[in-house]
């Protein structure tokens, strides 16, 4: 199997061209766990497959390091956009990708034939419990929820931006908070499908600092949809403007929550190397 190792701000992936590689559907969860293993495999946060689509220009499927399939991935889809364009799978700089979370428009910034930045129209956010999903009345919004985790009470905002997120605003975020509370929030009983946990510091009205514990992957260097969720939760609660930079361990993303209720994410994608597994 030929592959390309890529990352979006350190959130890394094994990307496979499904146009040329034939992979067994029932072995995909096992393959993801195998190739993502950082000791015995290639090492990555996830496995991405580029596939043809009958609904859009291309299709993306993504599997977490634990073998579970994710609905969406902001950093991953930027990597897929760069991969597809630079491999000639798409000729236009604006195109649409089919994901389990729906159709996602991409716009590429290209210089000398290489993709430098990718702008992604992520989704329309929803705070409704039924959309996240989260236990409780399905139409009730999950704003200002209180969770008892690890001997602490956290006030959180939960929402879906194509995949589920639980955002906690804190005065400071350290390793103990992320690695101690992240796994507990991921599997908190209120979230039947598990959830991504974002721990966020508000630096000013246009800047956030965030660390993330991703379901199925643990702490990662960056999470694109998590950054989107953090900005929307911050703006909705009056902490920031609707346009802000989100600083992650791996670098910065620029997020905009438009007046039309769409979330736009702009950031880089990087190819590390190609290989054969």
Image (cartoon, rainbow, N blue to C red):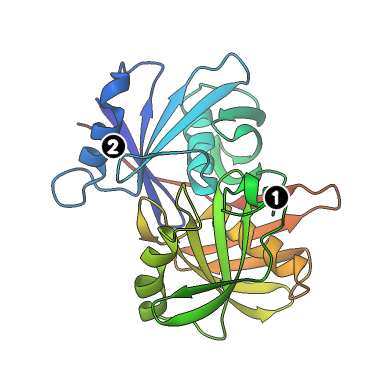
Name which residue lies at 69% across and 51% down: 128
Question: Could you say where residue 16 lies in the image, as x and y percent from the top left?
Answer: 36, 29
Q: Quadrant of residue 275?
A: top left
**Residue 107 placement, left or right of 47:** right
* Closer to us: 76 or 28: 28
Q: Quadrant of residue 242?
A: bottom right
Name which residue lies at 31% across and 16% down: 22
Residue 275 visible, this angle: no
Residue 21 visible, this angle: yes
Q: Secondary structure at mark 2?
A: helix
* Closer to us: 70 or 88: 70
Name which residue lies at 23% across and 33% down: 30
Examine the rendered structure and indicate whether residue 135 appears above or below residue 274.
below
* Closer to us: 142 or 206: 142
Label number found at residue 153 = none
Q: Secondary structure at mark 1?
A: loop
Identify the residue under disc 1: 126
What residue occupies the far bottom of the structure in this picture? 171
Question: Could you say where residue 136 lies in the image, as x and y percent from the top left?
Answer: 62, 54
If you read the primary sequence from the N terminus, does the residue marked by circle 1 or circle 2 appear first?
A: 2
**Residue 197 placement, left or right of 44:** right
Label number found at residue 32 = 2
Q: Quadrant of residue 235?
A: bottom right
Question: Could you say where residue 118 lies in the image, as x and y percent from the top left?
Answer: 60, 44
What residue occupies the far left of the structure in this picture? 40
């Amino acid at each position: 199997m030929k592959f390309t190792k890529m990352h979006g701000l350190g959130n890394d992936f094994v990307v496979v061209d499904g146009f040329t590689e034939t992979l067994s559907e029932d072995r995909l969860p096992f393959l993801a766990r195998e190739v993502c293993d950082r000791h015995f495999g290639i090492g990555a946060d996830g496995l991405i497959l580029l596939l043809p689509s009958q609904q859009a220009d291309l299709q993306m499927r993504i599997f977490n390091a634990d073998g579970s399939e994710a609905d969406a991935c902001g950093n991953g889809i930027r990597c897929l956009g760069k991969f597809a364009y630079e491999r000639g799978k798409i000729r236009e700089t604006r195109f649409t990708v089919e994901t389990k979370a729906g159709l996602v428009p991409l716009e590429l910034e290209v210089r000398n034939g290489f993709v430098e930045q990718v702008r992604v129209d992520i989704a329309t956010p929803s705070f409704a419990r039924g959309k996240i999903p989260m236990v409780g009345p399905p139409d009730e919004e999950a704003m200002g929820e209180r969770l008892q985790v690890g001997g602490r009470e956290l006030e959180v905002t939960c929402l879906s931006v194509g995949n589920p997120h639980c955002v906690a605003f804190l005065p400071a975020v350290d390793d103990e908070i992320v690695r101690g509370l992240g796994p507990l929030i991921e599997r908190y009983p209120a979230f039947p499908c598990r959830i991504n946990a974002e721990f966020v510091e508000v630096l000013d009205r246009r800047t956030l600092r965030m660390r993330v514990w991703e379901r199925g992957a643990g702490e990662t260097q960056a999470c694109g949809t998590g950054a989107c969720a953090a900005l929307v939760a911050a703006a909705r609660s009056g902490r920031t403007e609707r346009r802000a930079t989100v600083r992650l361990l791996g670098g910065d993303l620029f997020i905009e929550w438009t007046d039309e209720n769409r979330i736009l994410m702009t950031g880089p994608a990087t190819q590390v190397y190609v290989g054969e597994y």
